[in-house]
Amino acid sequence: MKNRLCPVCESVIQGRPDKKFCSPNCKSAHQYEMRKKEEEFYFQVDAQLKTNRKLLKRFNQKGKTIIRRDEFEKEGFNARFFTHYWKNQQNEVYYFCYEFGFRKIHDKGIKKYLLVSWQPYMN
């Protein structure tokens, strides 16, 4: 009978013939890696949302700020990732990452973001 090797650590597996891993630790490590691969997109989106929120909070200390898009995006901001949106009476759409939001604007031909914080009247 040929020795079976653990797919994680390549140790010889002893015991039942249908056993796939040499130890509970290797089985757990394998399951963790499989979950990580399966949910890779989720983790990427979650990380970008957290980055966006952190940047929106850092650059908008006063509750309303204007910043150049190219400078903001160099910091790691990606406008395609947001949690929700709000539309004002002028039909201008503000995109939010949790409680911090932004809207694309043009000021004298320069692309910018208007940064805002969520307000009670937006409910």
Image (spheres, helix red, strand yellow):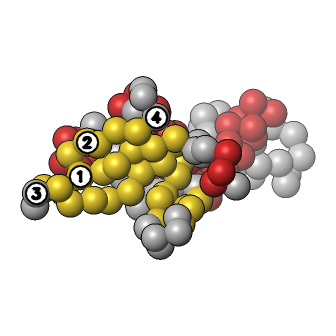
Residue where numbered disc 4 is placed: 63
Q: Are marks 3 and 1 in contact (CB under 8 Å)?
A: no
Q: Is residue 112 among the parts visible in the rendering?
A: yes
Residue sitting at x 34%, y 38%: 65
Q: Which mark is residue 108?
A: 3
Q: Amino acid at mark 4?
A: Gly
Which of discs 3 and 1 lies nearer the camera? The answer is 3
Residue where numbered disc 2 is placed: 67
| CA gap, disc 2 and disc 4 | 13 Å
Residue placed farthest to the left in the image?
A: 109
Residue placed farthest to the bottom in the image?
A: 91
The answer to whether 60 is drawn above or below residue 95 in the figure is: above
| CA gap, disc 1 and disc 4 | 16 Å
- Counting from the top left corner in percent of width and height, residue 120 is at 67, 45
Residue where numbered disc 1 is placed: 112
Q: Amino acid at mark 2?
A: Ile
- Counting from the top left corner in percent of width and height, residue 32 is at 68, 42
Quadrant assignment, res 58: top left
Counting the numbered discs, the total is 4
